[in-house]
Amino acid sequence: MTIPLSGWEVAKQIAKRFPDAVSEAYGYFVLVKSESLFEVAQYLKSSPEFDFDYLTNITAVDYYDYFEAIYQLTSLKHNHSLVLKTRCYGRDNPTLPSIVRLWRGADFQEREIHDLMGTTFKGHPNLKPIVLWQGFKGHPLRKDYL
Amino acid sequence: MEVSGSRKYIYSDTELDRAEGEEIEALKAHSQQPIPDPDRWLDEEVSRNILLTSVDAILNWARRSSLWPVTFAPACCAFEVIATAASRFDISRFGMEIFRASPRQADLMITAGTLTWKMAPQLKRIYDQMPEPKWVIAMGACAISGGIFRSSYSVVPGYNRIIPVDVYVPGCPPRPEGLLHGIRMLHYKISQGHTDIALYPLKTG
């Protein structure tokens, strides 16, 4: 069975390399600042002790004050998993870094979140609608839609 | 970051996306009102003094005895259609066991499932490709009115916004008995049809 890693333990490891990256960690998740998301994800993917080579999925939640993107990572080699979270503020043009360069599975899911939540993924190679059609007004999964 | 190499082929062309979006928006603007059901003539039979000739009777018998449905199943009602077509309920008792994969060989559309606006142009294209005379059974709550998704941003509230519907079969999903009852009602409707009317069901709406 896949063992979820303790968020606190992973946060300590991350803090050794990126002192300002982690803003919160308990249970099975680590909340990192969006500026350092890409570096942290790169570290989690490439370091031999974590080796998160598989991105299970990405999802996003609208909390009115901020959007929270949730990345569920799995290591097929060590058979453990981790939930990585990050937040972006503002409703006009919320921006997150894209992690397509690390996990190609993020490609379509980031486009879907861009459709439904309206968050821009900086560095995505082709950020255009995937589930909605070109010219659709608004972002339907935002809490203030309709 | 530029798209390059083999990677760009997993993305659709931007021009195609724009054309698709324009097509959907145009169809959406055009279909805000339901199309009237093409069955008002059933009650007007006496007042319009229509005589059914024996040619009509034979034509209608032939038409209703061998309806060929087109395979169109966007959602879960499809499983009830499959159950209807399988051996227990056995749709071939009505001469319609062949579900055609090509709309050009079909004359009945069983609309089994939720229709989204993104799918609507394809539905219209399939319907237009079917040869006359043709009939439509709206199967299930989503096909009749949009069902539980009626107020959604992406779902068409009823197939009759896009195409004229002959028979409505309620249920979520309807049981095979319900669908068979709808098919029997369609048989009755076809048997009442006049040749001209049956040939041009759109114009009598």
Image (cartoon, coloured by chain):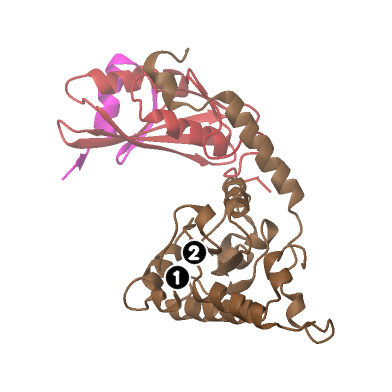
Chain colours: A red, B brown
Q: Is residue A5 visible?
A: no
- Residue A66, image quadrant: top right
Depth check: give the residue in front, B155 or A5: B155
Task: Give the x, y percent position of residue B106.
Answer: 52, 60
* Mark toward the start of the polypeptide (2 vs 1): 2
Where does the magenta region start and end? A1-29
**Magenta segment includes A18:** yes
- Residue B203, image quadrant: bottom right
Q: Amino acid at mark 2?
A: Pro
**Magenta segment includes B53:** no
Q: Residue at x 40, y 69 (%)?
A: B97
| Relative height, residue B98 to residue B90 (above, below) | above
Task: Give the x, y percent position of residue B103.
Answer: 52, 54
Q: In the displayed image of the protein, which residue is found farthest to the bottom?
A: B46
Marks 2 and 1 share the same chain: yes
The answer for how far apart the CA atoms under marks 2 and 1 are is: 7 Å
Q: Which residue is mark 2?
A: B69
Task: Give the x, y percent position of residue B122.
Answer: 57, 47
Depth check: give the residue in front, B21 or A10: B21
Q: Residue at x 60, y 57 (%)?
A: B131
Q: Amino acid at mark 1?
A: Met
Q: Secondary structure at mark 1?
A: loop
* Marks 2 & 1, CB-CB < 8 Å contact: yes
| Relative height, residue B46 to residue A26 (above, below) | below
Circle 1 chain: B
Q: Residue at x 44, y 34 (%)?
A: A109
Number of residues whose C-alpha sits closer than 10 Å to that of mark 2, classed few (under 14), some (14–19) or many (20 or more): many
Q: In the displayed image of the protein, which residue is found farthest to the right?
A: B47
Circle 2 chain: B
Mark drawn on residue B96: 1
Q: Secondary structure at mark 2?
A: strand
